[in-house]
Image (tube, helix red, strand yellow):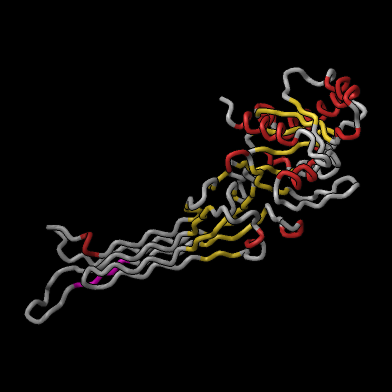
Amino acid sequence: MASNNFIDYVKINCRSGRGGAGSAHFFRAKGLPNGGPDGGDGGRGGHIILEGNSQLWTLLHLQYQKHIIAGHGVNGQESLRTGAQGEDIIVPVPLGTIARDAETGEIKAEVTEHGQRIILTPGGRGGLGNDHFKSATNQAPTYAQPGEPGIDEWVVLELKLLADVGLVGFPNAGKSTLLSVVSAAKPKIADYAFTTLVPNLGVVAYRDYKSFVMADIPGIIEGAAEGRGLGTRFLKHIERNSILLFMISCDSPDIAAEYDVLISELSQFNPELLEKRRLLAITKSDLIDDELEAEIRATLPTDLPSVFISSLTNKNIQPLKDMIWQALHAE
């Protein structure tokens, strides 16, 4: 996923189709000059529909498509013929997409499954023909309903990546390196802060052909909730993760304090994130010996499952996968 192609926010104008008008026609035939009303109904205006597509990862395809316009319904015709419906517009979106009203911020739709279809902007209903209004006291109604107008609105589409496990940590904690080792993802890796500027996804192969999805989130720093670093722009992507894997480098001067900072920033962004199951990986453990590892382990939270790993030497990578798999399937 190229960084310049990762788009997780777009604002689009949606215009659904207006409904067709009902017909006020009367049947006429030789020998039957007063055949009665036979006006058909107007067709429904076209909907704008969101469709989940698991093959999409960003909203890039909508970045330059600011106006989405559905077709209008056709008017009803004689002989009780209903007008054709307006053409629906199907908008494919990645899983995890939320649609909000651009003015109120109200959530209008949420797409989480492949093939799921949700009507975002409904088309106007078609009008009823005069055949619907005949009665014993009004046998020749000249009235037919007009079609309902369509809806013209601005909608914000926002993507929150769906993943089983989200990687949380300071810049240069080794998140991208781990993702590149355990999956086929090719995130940018370099020896400077904020190498990762956009989230990356990777499918991690597990035992017996099983797998899970891992998301690498750009690094968090103290004060991110106030806008420092990359701020909280990408923290929304871990709201949909089943578990959070905190990653802290073994060369950190105070691992416990760094973990507390990460917890604090998540809490300020969304306190509900703290309800998710958490794991801890101490990275770059190839730099320390067994004695120092034991000293560090004694300072770690006792109620938090943890493992020392090295993406460079593959140390404890399989035990890490086992720990993640067990957490994903724990009751």
In the depicted structure, whether residue 224 falls above or below residue 298: below
Magenta residues span 22-26
Task: Determine whether, in the image, residue 10 is placed left or right of residue 313.
Answer: left
* Residue 235 placement (x, y as % from top left): 73, 40
Q: Is residue 23 magenta?
A: yes
Given residues 17 and 142, the one toward you in this image is 17
* Residue 141 placement (x, y as % from top left): 21, 65
Residue at 61% x, 59% y: name it.
12
Q: Quadrant of the N terminus?
A: bottom right
Q: Is residue 325 magenta?
A: no
Given residues 127 and 232, the one toward you in this image is 232
Task: Determine whether, in the image, residue 261 is placed left or right of residue 69.
Answer: right
User: Is residue 100 in view from this perspective?
Assistant: no
Q: Main secondary structure of the magenta part?
A: loop
Examine the image and state in which quarter residue 35 appears. Answer: bottom left
* Residue 81 placement (x, y as % from top left): 26, 69
Given residues 85 and 136, the one toward you in this image is 85
Residue at 93% x, 28% y: name it.
253
> Which residue of the protein is positioned furthest toward the bottom in this rendering?
30
